[in-house]
Image (cartoon, coloured by chain):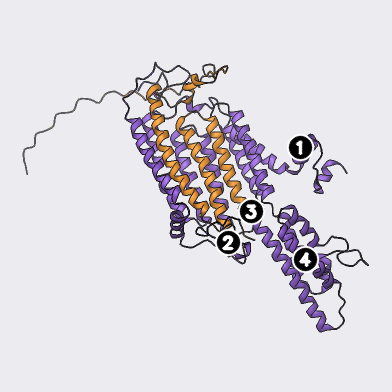
Chain colours: A purple, B orange
């Protein structure tokens, strides 16, 4: 089989040469690279230039890259209010971010940043952080942006200057950003990819809906006719054991192994004659499948989490301690997302003043020092302006010919 | 399975971070560069809050509060420093400070690529000045 077919079959390629590994990576992640190519092109075309490319090309490339992100990079989710709101807020924040980067007039850039902050706070609200939503809007959109709008008003009274219509190294900057984004998206994908575990869970769930033991066996452990179950190591239980071990969850893999041998193999190979015992047999088989599914769901919950260090008890004042066994964390039964306290501000306050008391004090000191420092620097006797600026750009007084 | 997974929020955070990076490197206005740096902080904040949500822990949210506090301090100090720089050169252009470059590096020169001339100010038609105001009749009666 050639390299690309091997890649599609998902085989390991460790140990091959660098060029081979790069080619394999390119083949597997073509969606990511295509999206980033078009997105990078959009930003590059839209960055301010003395003679800009027609805006339409950049905007079209931007829209295309957004659609590609939604289709190729984000996994398809169902349609629900949460998903619709997530798409709306994240699209708005990315579009406003692109506008912030590519707008010529700095006042418009500041307003685009306000829009970025508002859509980011919408995402905070979706993530059960209402206090942070309010705090971010007040501090960022209310204080920081307004302050900088004042500075723009006082410093650049004639709209945007020559310097604003130019970019420094647009091609290299876009390449750097796109490269970093490629690496980040790849790491996110491989670190949080639940595809394989989801496949096993789906198989076990459909097995639990089966009518006969034969159907269950066919779904979970497709074997050659004549071979006893468990002979090929091809069952979902065996393969999920390998996957769990690959993901570093050895305890779950061991429990899955205990479930399989002798539990599953004996159960599925048992011959039952009369009807009542057959019904009970089916129930036992389904119960075992349910246990295996629970193990896989626990593995899925823990995916991407770093294990806490041995021997150090972490506090449980900010939520369930990271050192607590996973079974103790209360989860929503359907979505398996851990519960967060409804009184967000109260619990956040408790967390800040117990777990994070020292950082709070340090942050207060930092604010004081920043205030004192800002006033001290601004109060310095006004430094003489330098010689008139070199004519690489207009000053804020506008173009030379314009007399007002 | 939850409708919107952790991965989706992390992707949004990464995109905002990298857009901010591109803007910080490419733009020349000091204020816009600072706003792009703030956008990078917003991307990080989304990451932290998403992890807090999907781990059931408020530590991520506490961290974001500290990020907001530090960003406010940073905005104050950055503002003052930009003010100092503006007083020197009367401009918010960061390229005017290219003399601080490292040795052996040629600063960029914009003179070869002038902007297109601005549109001429609009010419309005010149009208004849209005005629003398005709004398008014005196009011005979006063109410």
* Circle 1: element type: helix
Q: Name the residue under label 3.
A: A307
Gap between marks 2 and 1, in whole Å?
38 Å
| Residue A143 seen in this snapshot | no
Q: Which mark is residue A258?
A: 4
Q: Which residue in the structure is indicated by mark 2?
A: A338
Q: What element carries label 2?
A: loop
Give the number of marks. 4
Measured as percent of width and height from the top left, residue B112 is found at: 54, 16
> SS for tag 3?
loop
Quarter of the image that includes the C terminus of chain A: top left
Tell me which label, 3 or 1, sits earlier in the chain: 1
Please indicate whether residue A104 sits to the left or right of residue A75 in the image: left
Q: Do the residues indicated by labels 2 and 1 lie within the same chain of the protein?
A: yes
Residue that appears at 56% across and 28% down: A52
Subunit under mark 3 = A
């Amino acid at each position: 089989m050639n390299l690309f077919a091997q890649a599609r079959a998902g085989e390991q390629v460790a140990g091959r040469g660098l060029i081979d590994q790069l080619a394999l990576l390119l083949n597997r992640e073509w969606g990511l690279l295509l999206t980033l190519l078009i997105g990078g092109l959009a930003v590059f075309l839209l960055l301010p230039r003395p003679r800009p490319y027609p805006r339409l090309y950049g905007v079209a490339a931007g829209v295309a890259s957004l659609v590609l992100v939604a289709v190729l990079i984000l996994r398809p989710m169902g349609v629900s209010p949460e998903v619709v709101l997530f798409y709306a807020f994240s699209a708005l924040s990315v579009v406003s971010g692109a506008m912030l980067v590519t707008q010529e007039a700095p006042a418009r850039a500041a307003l685009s940043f306000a829009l970025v902050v508002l859509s980011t706070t919408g995402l905070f609200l979706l993530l059960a952080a209402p206090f942070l939503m309010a705090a971010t809007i007040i501090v960022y959109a209310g204080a920081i942006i307004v302050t900088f709008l004042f500075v723009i008003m006082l410093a650049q009274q004639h709209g945007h200057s020559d310097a604003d219509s130019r970019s420094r190294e647009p091609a290299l900057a876009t390449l750097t950003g796109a490269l970093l984004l490629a690496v980040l998206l790849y790491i996110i994908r491989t670190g949080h990819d639940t595809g394989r575990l989801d496949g096993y869970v789906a198989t076990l769930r459909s097995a639990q809906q089966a009518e006969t033991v034969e159907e269950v066996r066919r779904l979970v452990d497709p074997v050659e006719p004549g071979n006893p179950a468990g002979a090929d190591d091809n069952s979902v239980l065996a393969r999920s054991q390998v996957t769990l071990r690959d993901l570093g969850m050895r305890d779950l893999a061991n429990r899955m192994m205990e479930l399989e041998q002798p539990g599953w193999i004996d159960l599925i190979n048992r011959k039952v004659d009369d009807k009542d015992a057959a019904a009970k047999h089916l129930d036992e088989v389904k119960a075992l499948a349910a246990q295996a599914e629970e193990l896989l769901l626990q593995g899925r919950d823990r995916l991407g989490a770093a294990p806490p260090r041995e021997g150090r008890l972490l506090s449980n004042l900010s939520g369930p301690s990271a050192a607590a066994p996973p079974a103790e964390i209360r989860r929503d039964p359907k979505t398996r997302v851990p519960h967060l306290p409804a009184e967000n501000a109260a619990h956040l306050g408790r967390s800040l003043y117990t777990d994070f008391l020292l950082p709070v004090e340090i942050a207060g000191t930092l604010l004081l020092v920043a205030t004192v420092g800002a006033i001290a620097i601004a109060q310095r006797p006004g430094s003489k302006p330098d010689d008139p600026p070199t004519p690489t750009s207009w000053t804020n007084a506008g173009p030379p010919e314009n007399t007002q | 399975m939850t409708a919107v997974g952790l991965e989706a929020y992390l992707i949004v955070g990464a995109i905002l971070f990298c857009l901010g990076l591109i803007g910080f490197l490419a733009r020349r206005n000091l204020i816009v560069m600072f706003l792009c740096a703030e956008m990078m902080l917003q991307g990080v904040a989304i990451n932290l809050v998403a992890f807090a949500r999907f781990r059931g822990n408020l530590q991520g949210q506490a961290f974001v509060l500290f990020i907001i506090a530090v960003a406010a301090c940073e905005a104050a100090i950055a503002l003052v420093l930009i003010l100092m720089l503006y007083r020197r050169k009367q401009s918010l252009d960061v390229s005017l400070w290219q003399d601080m470059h490292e040795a052996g590096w040629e600063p960029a020169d914009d003179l070869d690529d002038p902007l297109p001339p601005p549109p001429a100010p609009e010419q309005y038609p010149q009208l004849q000045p209005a005629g003398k105001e005709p004398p008014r009749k005196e009011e005979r009666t006063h109410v």
